[in-house]
Every structure is written in C-alpha cells, then in structure tokens.
Image (cartoon, grey):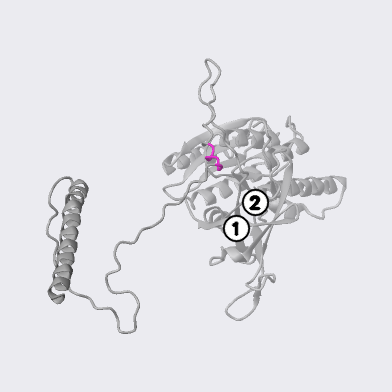
Amino acid sequence: MTMPRLNFSVSQRLTLDLLLLVIVALAGAPRIWAVGQAASGGQQPAAQPQQPDQAAPAAGGPSGDTGVIAVPKKKENPDEAPPPPAPAAPQFKNPEGMGNVTLHVNVPEVTIDVGVMLEKTHQFVPGLKPSNFRVFEDGVQQKVEGFKRTEAPITCLILMEYSARGMGFRIQALNAALAFAEQLRPQDYIAMMTFDLNTHIILDFTQDKQQLQQGMVMLENEVYMPAAFSESNVFDALNESIDRLERIEGQKYIVLIATGIDTFSKLTFDKIEKRVKAARDITIDTISTDGFFEAMTQGMGGMGGAMRDMSFLQADNEMKSFSDWTGGMHFAPRFVGEMPDDVKAINETIRAKYELIYHPTNARLDGTFRKIRVELVDDEGQPLRMQDEKKKPLKYDIITRDGYRAKQEVE
C-alpha cells in the first residue's frame, strides 16, 4: 500500500522541476534577442557561408581558425610633452627702394695654354695625356682639373717696326710679315699696325685676306722710300696694342716684328714688364729683325762696334722677355731662308696647344704675381723622355706663360 504513494511524489517533483526550467528559459529569451537586435542595427544578420569543419591537429595546438586577433592600442603617456612645432622661416625685408640682392662667390680659376714643340724641327708634340703634365704655382703643385687640346681660328695682330733706322730692317720686317700672312686660314681674324715714333693702323681686324694683301703692297711700295722717323718706340706701341686687344673676348696673339731697340717711349722697361705680365689672354710671339745685321757686324773692332753689339744684344733679350712672359716663341733669324720655318712654328704653336685649368691653392685676391712652371712626366712620375724612330733622344721645349697676376679684390 505504501509503494504507489512513493512513486507519485517523485513524479510530481520531476514535473515541478521541468516547469521551473521552462519558465527560466522563457524569461531570458527576450533579453538575448534584444541584445542581438541592437548589435546588428535592428536587422537580421546575413547568412554566413558554412565553413568546413577543421579538426584540431593530432599533436594538439591551435586549430586552423584562430579567430580575430586584437592588437592592443599603445597607451599615451600623459607626462610626455608633444614635440615643438618647426620654427617659421625668417622673413627679411629689403630697405625701401632696394631690389633683391644676390650673393655670388667667385672661385679663382686659372687657364694656361701649353705648347710642346720639338727643339730641332719645331713640330707640335701630340698625344699627351693629363697625367703627363705637372703645374706648379710659386713652387706649389696644383691639381689639374681641366684638360683639352685646342686647335681653332686665331685672332692676331701683326705689330711691325717700320722706321727710318735702315732700309734693310724694313725689308727684313716685311719678309717676316709676308711669311706669316701666307700661313693664315680663312677663319682667322688679322689686323696690322706699324710704328716708328708713333703707331699707324694699316688694317683693322678682318677675315678678308685681300685687304691684308693691299696693306702689304702699300708697305712694299714705300719700303725704298725714306721713312719719316728713325725712332722706334716699341714699348709704347706694345702697350697700345695690349689696350686694343683687351677689349676683345677670348685668346689673342701679337706677332711683334722689330729690332727691339727703344728710343723715346714714355714707358720704361720696368713699366712695360708689369703691363705685359698683367695682360690677360694675350700671347706675344717675337721676331727680331736685327739677327742678320748682328751676325754681319758682330766682333768688328772699335768702340762703335762694341756699342752696336751691346744694343742689339739688349734689344734681343727684351724681345725674348716679351714672349717668355706670355708663353710665346722668340726667333732671331740670321738668314732670309730661316723666316718661313720660324713663322710656321709660330703658326702651329698658336693653333695647336694643350689647355690646362686649375683652381689655385692660393685663393687670395691680392693682385700679386704668381710664377707658373710646367713639367712633363711619364706614367711613373719621372721626367718625360722622347725619342725618334731610331731610338735617338729628342729634346723638346715647353712653351707657356711665365705666370699671371691675381685679381684684386676690388675688381
């Protein structure tokens, strides 16, 4: 009689527990649905593609789907001050009425022309490299930064003594001028001046060689006529020629054909030396016309002969100095047959040269005169030696200017 009663009690308790679970589930369902609606904006979530079931590796570890990776945000340090802003560009205001000012820094640059000629044949030596040249300024070696071989048309002034010193001197000078004119090319610019006590312009710069021939013919017609003055102011004439040529851009040349004897020039030799050395882009080649007469009269007895020899020797040294100071060539031919070869050597040296450029280590703009020396060396740094096809040594001359005068700071 007691067993049925016990079974009824257990069943009734299970029923009450089940009802309690259902009530709790129904009470929580609306809240979960509301939260899902708020996260999705009130819309039903879209259907997601079904992912394949990825089993965990046999050895353990994370499965293929690791989920979303959260990167923690760097915490800001409230004690760290922000970087200061970049300073504003300074504003400068020019004084009223003053325009913009530009600052230029001039770096001194020296350009020198170097001719290398065989001593015996006066032929130009080609094929030299930049490493074959060493340039010294006041004894300090300079670094050659520019190098090229130049051969271009020339701008040249023939400056010829044409005085009453003697008919033979005029003939010798005219022969030299004619020989030089034969070497000219169509692109060359040529001018001609003569001098005695004063200077005379025979021909202004031109490329018309017929005008030069007409000037030569005029001088030929007058060569046997007595000249006006026997004086020859070579220093003044050379100074005037430099003044004229400095107005022309580029490299210029003066072929000075004269005895070199000066009489009444306003400039002394010291002054013309400074003037010649200060000349820029001007090379002076000289031909002494007293070589023939010096050879004929040298050694003749008497006080007059000794004084004449001394005058010729001094004049010849002065002519050579003009060419040495500017990197030109000097000749004192003793025979007429030498003239064409001498003039040809001058012409080849004028056209074919090596141009060297360097920035001097002494960059001061003090107007001082700087001595220049150029040497030729081989690949091992030893003095360069030349030889002919028969292995005989050849002597050569290095033709360049003696130096230059630095610019003044006020220029």
Q: What residue is drawn where x is 60% and y is 65%?
A: 131
Res. 200 visible in picture: yes
Q: Quadrant of residue 396?
A: bottom right
**Are discs 1 and 2 less than 8 Å apart at CB?**
yes
From the viewer's perspective, is residue 1 above or below residue 234? below
From the viewer's perspective, is residue 1 above or below residue 409? below
Res. 233 visible in picture: no
Task: Please tell me which of labels 1 and 2 falls first in the chain.
Answer: 1
Q: Which residue is mark 2?
A: 327
Q: Which residue is mark 1?
A: 115
Tell me which segment is drawn in magenta: 79-84
Q: Is residue 270 magenta?
A: no
Asked whether, in this view, residue 192 is left or right of residue 33, the answer is: right
Quarter of the image that includes the N terminus = bottom left
- Farthest-out residue, top: 96
Q: Amino acid at mark 1?
A: Gly
Query: Which x, y percent locates residue 363?
Result: 68, 44
**As rendered, which of 179 and 5 lies closer to the eye?**
5
